Amino acid sequence: MRAEDNDPHGEGTSPEDNDPYEDGLVGRGNVASAFTEADAKSRSGNYIVPFGLPGSGKTTMLASLFKYIDESPLLSSEIVIPERKKVPNYAGQAMLNEWQRIFNSGRFLGATEVGDLGIRELTYKVQPNKGQRTTLDFSVVEVSGEDLVKVIADTGSDPKLPGAIGALFTNTRVRPVIVLVVHPNQLENDLLFNNLYAWLRRNVKARMSSFSLAVVIANPDLALSRLHKRRPDTAGQDTLGGKMAMVYLQEFAPKTYAIYNGWEKSKRAISPFYVGEIKSTETEGEVLERIVRFEDRNASQIFAWAYHQFTNRKLGRTRLQQWIKKLGG
């Protein structure tokens, strides 16, 4: 990359000479498309923050979640376009469009852009069409796994989070739901989550009681296969349901299990994440995987849980509606 490609204002110019808002659009690789620490400090409301190692499946999980929200006949949804200096920021919508193009073609999503300029915010407004009708406004923040691993303390390197994520966690007007994405191919899941937990206790301990925590196990078929090898007594189980997910976590990520087990029960959840039916083909020694049929079961469950965390209401019929239906036979 040329040096001038890193200069958002162009070589030899000042910010005033090249206004990033002059064309009425924000995004498309522009510095103004990023979700910044200043943005995070100014926000309020509900935020889902996925956390996981590079390649853990964070983006695939988010793409699945929004595919379910957009396509479910039980929900009405719309994207919310934020503004900065009264100019719309379409970066979140552009990111979602790219997810949809890739995901709908059956491909898995690749890595997220590394660095603060790659952080994106996506905001949605969702209303159930039946039963409980409370509208939910919430946002997600997409961050590269390469940036998240910086929270791991190392020799000569103090642990830190990307500025925007740290600011969300410390912002008292924000209600965070942290989603830990565990992938069976990743050997340092526990290391990452333990260091995140240490950062939270050091920096926002007084606020942690308001946080919700979900643990999502990606590629559950692979996870279950490895659990069977380590724990032959589980061989009769053919799905990674709630109980088996807990057993898997205890065996392969014991510190994460301890963190989860110590979290307030009403504010925690654990789930496998089946994306759907996957077909594998091998070409010239390379295995290529394609999603041939999307499965929204886990995406719908995770959304229902997040809806309850944010609104304190459960999707489906209200008690009064259930009572009326019972009276009507």
Image (cartoon, helix red, strand yellow):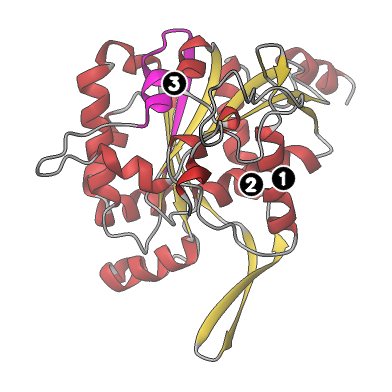
- Badges 1 and 3: C-beta atoms under 8 Å apart? no
The single residue placed furthest to the right in the displayed view is: 328
Q: Quick check: 282 above or below 52?
A: below
Report the magenta residues as a range: 162-180
Q: Quick check: 23 above or below 190?
A: above
Q: Quick check: 174 above or below 314?
A: above
Q: Tell me the element at label 2.
A: helix
Residue in view at x 50 percent, y 54 percent = 111
Residue 171 % position (x, y): 41, 12
- The amino acid pointed to by label 2 is Ala
For the residues marked 1 and 3, what is the alpha-carbon distance in whole angstroms?
Answer: 28 Å
First along the sequence among labels 1 and 3: 3
The numbered disc on residue 67 is 1
- Crowding at dot 2, Cα within 10 Å, few <14 / some 14-19 / many 20+, comes out as many
Q: Tell me the element at label 1.
A: helix
Residue 126 % position (x, y): 73, 25
Residue under pointer 2: 63
In this rendering, would 9 be left or right of 100? left
- Badges 2 and 1: C-beta atoms under 8 Å apart? yes
Q: Nearer the viewer, residue 67 or 166?
A: 166
